[in-house]
């Protein structure tokens, strides 16, 4: 099978880590993959194993140069002739419309950006998960819950774009989610149950150690260092431990400087705690060395790898 993958970027977070593993497994099973993306981010690239096509900003919500970008996508489709398009994090309504009407399409809904203008599904003023479906009323709710831009000139285009993407996928695409929670999110956003498949991310078997070599037990957390991932909460909780242990955080992101400052106040050794981006094999080794892996997210985590 020939599969055309489309994603916002080639690096930067969990989606791209998943794609890196996915490309390898699909190749092992005899399938061909090509990849379209529009943003470069720091971090491990997932483009090393597949033929990749960089079209600047193609997956973002923008009208700038969209005709030229879609022509570039058309050229790739005509040359590659994929059996299916596998859509990941794509926020550009015209691109979605073009692809779903050109080739059979599957979308993996990794997060909330397709059904939430702010992308976090949190009613920030109350700290609760948002269970409202996507609609123009989201702009009104922004004033009460502070959950998205309150300026209609900013908010309404985001709502309209997300609604257009959902409409195209409801008509033409099969949807994949990683958890029953995400399946329910799609259901109350008007998707048909028969078009949704729950397929958790695959991982490699962990070798459980009976004995640990480290003098101190290791507490491990991994992820992109953004506020929603809750690493600040983990550092504060770890500082209150009554037993001796070592905290290890794998990942990078815009919150790194603040987290290092918080870690210094909490008495953490920066060099031992913050390891930056590591490849999949290195992450697996750290998992095997750790007594516990913590997922401290403060947002409604869709389902992490």
Image (tube, rainbow, N blue to C red):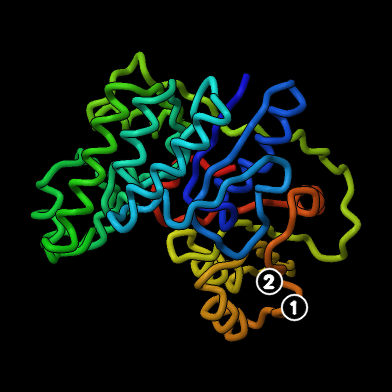
Q: Quadrant of the N terminus?
A: top right
| Residue 66 position (above or below residue 224) | above
State left or right for residue 95 relative to residue 86.
left
Tell which of 199 and 248 is nearer to you. Answer: 199
Decide which of 14, 208 is in the foreground and name it.
14
Tag of residue 122 = none
Residue topped by disc 1: 271
Relative to residue 62, is residue 150 drawn left or right? left
Q: Secondary structure at mark 2?
A: strand
Residue beneath the point at 67% across and 62% down: 250
For the C terminus, the quadrant is top right
| Residue 39 at x, y percent in the picture | 50, 58
232 lies above or below 212: below
Tell me where residue 67 appears, x and y as whole percent: 33, 47
Q: Left or right: where does residue 193 sit relative to residue 176? A: left
The Cα atoms of the two marked residues, 2 and 1, are separated by 6 Å
Q: Which residue is mark 2?
A: 274
Answer whether labels 2 and 1 touch (C-beta < 8 Å). yes
State how many labels appear. 2
Work out whether residue 119 or residue 89 is closer to the camera in this orientation and state it: 89
């Amino acid at each position: 099978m020939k599969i055309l993958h489309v994603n916002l970027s080639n690096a930067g977070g969990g989606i791209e880590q998943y794609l890196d593993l996915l490309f390898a497994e699909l190749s092992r099973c005899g399938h061909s993959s090509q990849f379209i993306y529009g943003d470069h981010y720091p971090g491990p690239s997932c483009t090393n194993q597949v033929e990749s096509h960089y079209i600047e900003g193609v997956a973002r919500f923008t009208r700038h140069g969209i005709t030229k970008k879609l022509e570039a996508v058309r050229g790739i489709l005509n040359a590659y002739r994929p059996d299916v398009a596998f859509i990941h994090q794509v926020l550009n309504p015209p691109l979605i419309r073009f692809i779903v009407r050109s080739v059979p399409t599957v979308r993996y809904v990794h997060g909330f950006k397709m059904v939430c203008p702010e992308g976090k599904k949190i009613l920030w003023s109350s700290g609760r998960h948002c269970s409202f479906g996507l609609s123009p009323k989201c702009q009104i709710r922004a004033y009460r819950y502070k959950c998205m831009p309150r300026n209609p000139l900013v908010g309404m285009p985001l709502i309209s774009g997300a609604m257009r993407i959902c409409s195209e996928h409801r008509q033409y695409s099969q949807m994949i989610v990683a958890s029953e929670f995400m399946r329910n999110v799609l259901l109350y956003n008007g998707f048909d149950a028969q078009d949704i498949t729950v397929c958790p991310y695959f991982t490699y078997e962990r070798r459980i150690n009976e004995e640990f070599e480290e003098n101190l037990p290791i507490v491990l957390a991994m992820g992109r260092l953004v506020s929603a991932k809750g690493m600040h909460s983990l550092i504060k909780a770890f500082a209150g431990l009554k037993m001796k242990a070592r905290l290890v955080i794998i990942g990078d992101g815009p919150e790194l400087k603040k987290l290092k400052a918080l870690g210094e106040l909490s008495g953490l050794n920066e060099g031992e705690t913050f390891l930056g981006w590591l490849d999949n094999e290195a992450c697996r080794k750290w998992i095997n060395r750790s007594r516990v892996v913590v997922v401290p997210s403060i947002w409604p985590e869709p389902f992490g790898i």
